[in-house]
Image (cartoon, grey):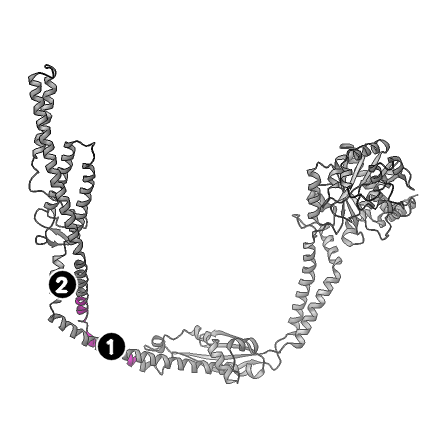
Amino acid sequence: MIPGLKKRKVSLHDVFMYVALVQKHVRLIGLLTAITFLGALNYYIYARPIYYSKAVARMDSVPQPVDSQSLFRDTQVHTIYGELTSPLVIERTAARFGIHDSARSIEAKIVRQVKIAITGGRSAQIEVWAISKDLVDNWARVLIEEHETFRRERHQRQRDAIYTTYTQAIQDAAAMMTESIEDKMSLRESNDTVRTMIELQKYQSLPAELIRMEKRINDMGRAKVHLEDPALDVIAKLSLITGLENDAQLADTSSLKLGDQVQWNGIAKKSGIAEPSETPSSTTSVIVVPSMSPKVSVWQELDRNLQEARKELAEKSLYFLPGHRTMKTIQARIDELSQKLEIEYLGAKRRFDLEYQDVITRRKELDGQIQNYTRVTKESQIVDSQNAIFRLSRLNWEKMISEMQKKLEELEYAWDRERVELTFLNVRDSSGRPVSPDFVKLLMMAAALGAAFGLGVPFLIEYLDHTIHSLDEVESACQLRGLGIVPKHESNRPMSLLATGETSGHDLVENFRVIRTNILSIGSVSTPPRVIMITSAMPKEGKTVVSANLAISFARNGGRTVILDADLRRGRLHRLFGYRKSPGLSDVLLGDVSIDDACRPTSYENLFVLSAGKHLDTGTELLASQKFTDIMARLREKFDHVIVDTPPVLGLSETSILQKLADGVLFVIWSGNTPMGSVKAAIEMLQKHGANFYGFVLNRLDLNATQNYYQYYYYSHDYYYNYRHAALEQA
């Protein structure tokens, strides 16, 4: 893990830590640097030599009124230089040297690079890098020669194409002129044009009449539906029929007949249509003025008489009874008028139905004439197109042919006159020694790449390393307090580390004193540390060794302490103290022995051991039983401190059961081995079950590593060794 990665500022501490990381990976850095230099040396020995030359060419540009650029669309000066490196010119140049290959292969294997730069208004500089001395000395000259030959050949092809095109155009123009004259004469002799115009006049009003018939059919269809409505009375139906008849008369009056219409500025006008203003617009409307207003119909007169009779009946009813002679006379007149209206409606309905059938029949007749209208319209368009062609045929064909002949003469004039011409001058710079590979440049590149790989790879390894190396990482990531560290020891027997002598393992004794003191200080403000559960995220992180040494530290402090091995599957605590596995906790849970017989004393004062006992497949169920709860209560009464060594958290369920009976949890982390993700997952799992964390211990920390020695110097053996000698000198 790279130090200071998530900090905003780099401190002096981070500088020392980076130096320590470099010292940690010094062998890898040296190996990567050596490999880089070895690769550079191998390239220098076996790489193909590259030679270099610089040549100069002169550019002659002569502006002319008629030149090859305007006729052949020749390239500009800068583009001509670009053509020198085109694949076709490169292949032609290489063929002059006996090299027959593709341009890509030539550039990759033989002529590595060609640079062309404009050094002035009339000169160019050509730089060549190739694999032989002969190529770099002659490539620029041959390249310019082949380029000029290529341009001449291209111009010849373009000249031939233009000449052929113009000659064919002249012939086509003459043929078209002759054909146009003949078509015009033959068209005048035929009567198709006159016949087409007559038929067009005949069918010109067909679209408008179709639209009018369609509207009439729609209106009468809707009226027919309303006439079938029983809710409408006779008067309403007669009004509907009369309204349709008036609309039909108005449409007939305002319709334009073919013989009456004239054309005036794009607006149709006739008698009965208002004259447009002096300056008509595209939106001028046509107003139809009928010749006379419609007369009052018979049914309207009957309806008026009926209304008057009903009004009179209502007035007389105020003075006479319904059976009076006057009332009967008026009622008889009302019935007579109603009967006449009904007869009038039947007659109007019969006329309406006949007219509806006539309109439908007329619509079908018009539909049959649509094909004729379409045919006549197309023939009219063809005639108009032919007339337009004939009007265009009046162009001066002789002038067009004359202009083409003039262009051919200009082409012949400009053929032998190039606007831009390149001429090879000489080779100014050519060395017999190869320019590549360059030893100094290669050495500098190897040094830069060696430094990049030598520093980048180790730092990449550290960046990808997600294991834990310091207390600060866990404290910031998991919000747990670091209680202390346990240094990595060379001995394979952990119990020899906390011997009773003051000169043997004194630094480790102080480490566990710090852990013990921190646990007691935390217990003073929260739950007192009577029962302490020690666990870890993964197996083999040193829980048992930390549990044993911490129990020894508590025992030396004067409190009666028992260390309990709760790992009924793979318990190994008994080996540290030289006991057999049974009798132990499983035997007590099964009732084979008492708890007093199972707790065995050790060589340390106030320290007792309760091993795991014999292996049981139902160990998890026994730990969750009431009997185990009673055993823990008994141990609380008998001892001041109970250190519980448990299985790892991830993948097992014993820890979640045991933490309910403990006052707090001490988490053990193997430095440089345990991933941060596993630690977070284990802590989150314990927190979900309500665990009370005292903190964590960083186990097996290598203090011989430079970064750890600098950061945790006061935990090391040298610190305590120097401290003791300073104390003796003061004494």
Task: From the viewer's perspective, tell me whether residue 654 is left or right of residue 448.
Answer: right
Label whose residue precedes the other's in the sequence (2 or 1):
1
Mark 2 is surrounded, within 10 Å at the Cα level, by few (under 14), some (14 to 19) or many (20 or more) other residues, namely some
Q: In this view, does 718 lie above or below 337?
A: below
**Does residue 470 show up?**
yes
Q: Is residue 389 above or below residue 465?
A: below
Residue at x-position 14% and y-position 73% = 186
Residue 325: x percent and y percent? 6, 17
Residue 407: x percent and y percent? 28, 78
The segment highlighted magenta reads 386-410
Task: From the viewer's perspective, tell me whether residue 454 is left or right of residue 77.
Answer: right
Q: Does the magenta stretch include residue 260?
A: no
Residue at mark 2 to residue at mark 1: CA–CA distance: 32 Å
Q: Is residue 389 magenta?
A: yes
The amino acid pointed to by label 1 is Asp
Residue at x-position 69% and y-position 50% = 4
**Does residue 559 show up?**
no
Give me the disc on residue 356. none
Q: Is residue 110 above or below residue 458?
A: below
Task: From the viewer's perspective, tell me whether residue 562 is left or right of residue 470.
Answer: right
Q: Is mark 2 on a helix, strand or loop?
A: helix
The amino acid pointed to by label 2 is Thr
Q: Name the residue under label 1.
A: 172
The residue mark sitting in front, 2 or 1, is 2
- The residue lying toward the viewer, choosing from 278 and 592, is 592
- The residue lying toward the viewer, choosing from 278 and 533, is 533
In terms of image quadrants, where is residue 304? top left
